[in-house]
Image: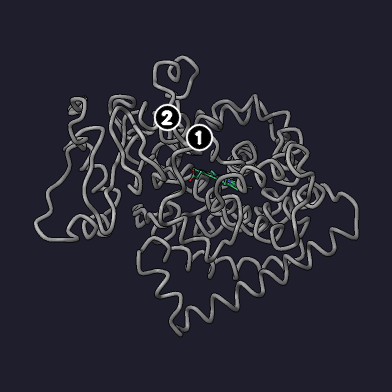
């Protein structure tokens, strides 16, 4: 096991606060360059080299990277009122507007109260049939020996699911237009990761015109959905709940048209690619681990015996859930979370001055050998209740935590379990020799060049 040095020290009273250790720059901007070159590798290196708390001076701000579970809890839960979202999500307002992901303070709390009923487990359970049905129909045209690009296929499945459950939309032309517009919008989102993103957004570049066109089309489609939903009753989808939600704890008001649009767009963006990535990585890991694949098949055959899964099956598909938990440990779709301290705050015993940027990384924590011996090994049995109980709560946080915890977490679990169960029951996804996985950490963690596989029908 690697031991991580504890370099924390309490400053003497009245002495200037000391910062955690960190790398020395040989020239200005060196650390930022190294982060840009290989952000996952460099974040891991910083923690292994300097300990669970690292600090350095970056462009325009002091940066902290924390990896200790207690410090992670401070950032997400105990001291979350001292933080706002980090620079990348602040810049993302330009593309996402005032949705849940980017809004702050009282405004965020109000939006969250209004959106919460749409994600209540009892409501999410009603989407289960659509989720399993869409997975089944997506696989209808598949045949034994077919080559496919797995990430693209998973994106199509989760796109159909989010369109159906959010907007009650299944018209192919709508799906196509939404899918294309989303691709362009997500591409622009990656710009938010660079400080010069906002400047690039203002230049007369073809990419900006493409983005504006795509977003206009997407907004027109969402506006049409909202109009149609206002005229009809509850159509059983998320948008129906958002339109009717009243803030009973606040001003008793409802969401305006533009808020409804921003919120729908945010939920759509946050809920589509993340789940597709989790499914892609899970199928990739199963392809490389025949024992785990056999254990999954045994569970599916025993619980489902060839029929389509329903929401009632979810709690009996314990191994399926463990496969997904382990896949999100090794390849967390949200691989890091950034925050900016809006006031001086103590995190894990360290003084963090107002204006500092704080990073915590699921990629780094989830591969820490103190919590996950042989961290590179794919072992779903790490997720039995007994094994989980041995680890600190904040050694695993694929859905974040605290007031900004993923609102779609139970949606994502049910969706991923039902889709994986439906597909893996009938199909094996054989990795091609060329399918070496390179990950691409953009706004989510995804396979860099897709993932080519050959389908094998299970007999
Ligand atoms: C495997 C799938 C998913 C993962 C790993 C994931 C991960 C996350 C994480 C880590 C956050 C917190 C971000 C932060 O603290 O800065 C978040 C927020 C959010 N997620 Fe998810 N998510 C997933 C699926 C979904 C789904 C299916 C939906 C909706 C249908 C969704 C909607 C949202 C929204 C709206 C927020 C913002 C919540 C707020 O700040 O109040 N996510 N997600």
Q: Is residue 25 above or below residue 204?
A: above
x then y, percent, for residue 113: 69, 40
Residue shown at 51%/29% (left/top)? Answer: 322
User: Which quarter of the picture shows residue 201?
Assistant: bottom left
Q: Local crowd at mark 1 within 10 Å, few (<14), some, or many (≥20)?
A: some
Residue shown at 40%/16% (left/top)? Answer: 390
x then y, percent, for residue 52: 25, 32
Quadrant where the image shows the C terminus: top right
For the image shown, how many numbered marks are present on the structure? 2
Per the rendering, the mark at residue 359 is none
Quadrant containing ligand 1 reads top right
Relative placement, left or right, of 280 versus 316 is left
Q: Which one is nearer the viewer's eye here, 15 or 76? A: 15
Relative placement, left or right, of 279 versus 179 is left
Q: Which one is nearer the viewer's eye here, 127 or 114? A: 114
x then y, percent, for residue 76: 45, 35
Q: Is residue 198 above or below residue 291?
A: below
- Asked if the residue at label 2 sits under 8 Å from ligand 1, the reply is no
Q: Which residue is the site of mark 1? A: 401
Q: CA distance from mark 2 to mark 1?
A: 8 Å
Q: Which one is nearer the viewer's eye here, 200 or 325? A: 200
Q: Which residue is the site of mark 2? A: 73
Quadrant where the image shows the N terminus: top left
> Secondary structure beneath disc 2?
helix
Circles 2 and 1, Cβ within 8 Å, touching? The answer is: yes
**Residue that protrudes farthest toward the left in the picture:** 26
Evaluate whether residue 2 shows in this view.
Answer: no
User: Which quarter of the picture shows residue 441?
Assistant: bottom left
Evaluate whether residue 368 shows in this view.
Answer: yes
x then y, percent, for residue 174: 72, 68
């Amino acid at each position: 096991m690697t031991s991580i040095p504890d370099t924390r020290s309490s400053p003497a009273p009245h002495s200037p606060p000391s910062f955690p250790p960190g790398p020395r720059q040989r020239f200005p901007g060196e650390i930022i360059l190294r982060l840009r070159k290989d952000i996952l590798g460099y974040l891991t290196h910083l923690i292994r080299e300097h300990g669970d708390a690292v600090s350095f001076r970056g462009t325009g701000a002091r940066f902290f990277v924390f990896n200790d579970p207690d410090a992670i809890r401070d950032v997400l839960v105990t001291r979350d009122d001292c933080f706002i979202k980090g620079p990348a999500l602040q810049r993302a307002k330009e593309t996402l507007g005032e949705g849940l992901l980017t809004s702050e303070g009282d405004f965020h709390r109000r939006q969250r109260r209004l959106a919460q009923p749409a994600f209540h487990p009892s409501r999410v359970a009603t989407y289960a049939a659509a989720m399993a049905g869409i997975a089944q129909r997506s696989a209808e045209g598949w045949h034994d020996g077919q080559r496919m690009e797995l990430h693209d296929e998973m994106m199509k499945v989760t796109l159909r699911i989010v369109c159906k459950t959010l907007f009650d939309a299944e018209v192919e032309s709508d799906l196509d237009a939404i899918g294309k517009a989303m691709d362009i919008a997500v591409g622009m989102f990656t710009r938010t990761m660079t400080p010069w993103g906002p400047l690039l957004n203002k230049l007369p570049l073809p990419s900006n015109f493409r983005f504006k066109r795509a977003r206009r089309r997407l907004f027109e489609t969402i506006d049409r959905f909202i109009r149609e939903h206002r005229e009809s009753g509850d159509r059983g989808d998320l948008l129906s709940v958002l339109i009717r939600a009243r803030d009973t704890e606040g001003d008793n008001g409802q969401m305006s048209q533009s808020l409804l649009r921003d919120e729908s767009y945010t939920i759509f963006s946050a809920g589509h690619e993340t789940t597709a990535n989790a499914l892609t990585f899970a199928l990739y890991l199963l392809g490389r681990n025949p024992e785990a694949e056999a254990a999954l098949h045994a569970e599916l055959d025993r619980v489902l015996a060839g029929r389509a899964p329903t929401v009632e099956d979810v709690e009996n598909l314990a191994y399926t859930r463990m496969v997904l938990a382990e896949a999100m440990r090794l390849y967390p779709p949200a691989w890091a979370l950034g925050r900016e301290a809006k006031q001086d705050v103590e995190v894990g015993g360290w003084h963090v001055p107002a204006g500092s940027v704080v990073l915590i990384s699921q990629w780094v924590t989830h591969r820490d050998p103190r919590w996950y011996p042989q961290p590179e090994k794919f072992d779903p049995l790490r997720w039995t209740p007994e094994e989980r109980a041995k680890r600190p709560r904040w050694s695993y946080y694929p859905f974040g935590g605290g007031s900004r915890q993923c609102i779609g977490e139970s949606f994502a679990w049910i969706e991923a379990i039902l889709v994986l169960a439906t597909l893996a029951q009938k199909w094996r996804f054989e990795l091609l020799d060329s399918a070496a996985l390179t990950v691409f950490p953009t706004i989510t963690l995804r396979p860099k060049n897709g993932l080519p596989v050959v389908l094998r029908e299970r007999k």
